[in-house]
Image (cartoon, rainbow, N blue to C red):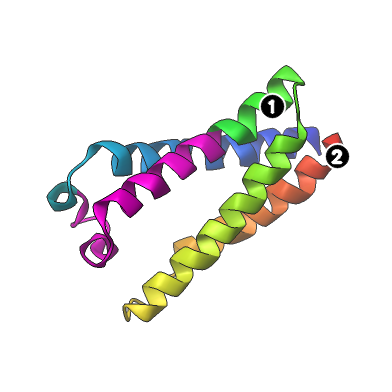
């Protein structure tokens, strides 16, 4: 189960580091082709979501790796579950039915959280 955690957490970490980093540094015009929802969201909120994603990605890897407060990995995974529930709602509210990635990330975060519980 330890190997499964590191594989899944590593993939989620890479995804959210990239996605969060992009939201932190790119302008609305640069984000629009990838994320149509930025038009209906204030940029401070987009930046906050990006910061949450980056911090969550770090929370999946760093605490279990160092052994310092490894329970934070579970908190990060639960945070990503909540984030993806919100993201799915936003997509559906805007009429975008392409939510397969959101559901995949939601399930991956659920499994990662379950595997992270071994450190509790």
Image coordinates for residue 95, horizontal then vertical, percent: 32, 81
Residue depicted at 41% across the width and 49% down the height: 49
Instruction: Give the position of the C terminus as an image quadrant.
Output: top right
Q: 12 or 68, which lies in front? A: 68
Q: Secondary structure at mark 2?
A: helix
Location of residue 6 (image quadrant): top right
Residue for badge 1: 63
For label 1, the crowd category at 10 Å Cα-Cα, with few meaning under 14, some 14 to 19 and many 20 or more, is: some
Count of numbered badges drawn on the protein: 2
Q: Secondary structure at mark 1?
A: helix
Alpha carbon distance from label 2 to label 1: 13 Å
Range shown magenta = 31-57
Residue for badge 2: 118
- In the rendered image, the residue lying farthest to the top is 66
Query: For the stretch drawn in magenta, what is the main secondary structure?
Result: helix
Image coordinates for residue 45, horizontal then vertical, percent: 34, 53
């Amino acid at each position: 189960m330890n190997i499964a955690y590191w594989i899944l957490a590593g993939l989620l970490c890479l995804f959210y580091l990239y996605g969060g980093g992009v939201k932190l540094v790119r302008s609305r015009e640069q984000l629009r082709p990838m994320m149509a929802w930025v038009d209906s969201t204030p940029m401070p909120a987009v930046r906050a979501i990006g910061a949450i994603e980056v911090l969550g990605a770090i929370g999946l890897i760093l605490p279990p790796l160092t052994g310092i407060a490894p329970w934070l990995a579970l908190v990060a995974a639960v945070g990503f579950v909540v984030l993806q529930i919100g993201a799915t709602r936003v997509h559906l509210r805007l009429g975008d039915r392409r939510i397969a990635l959101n559901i995949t990330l939601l399930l991956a975060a659920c499994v990662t959280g379950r595997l992270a519980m071994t450190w509790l």
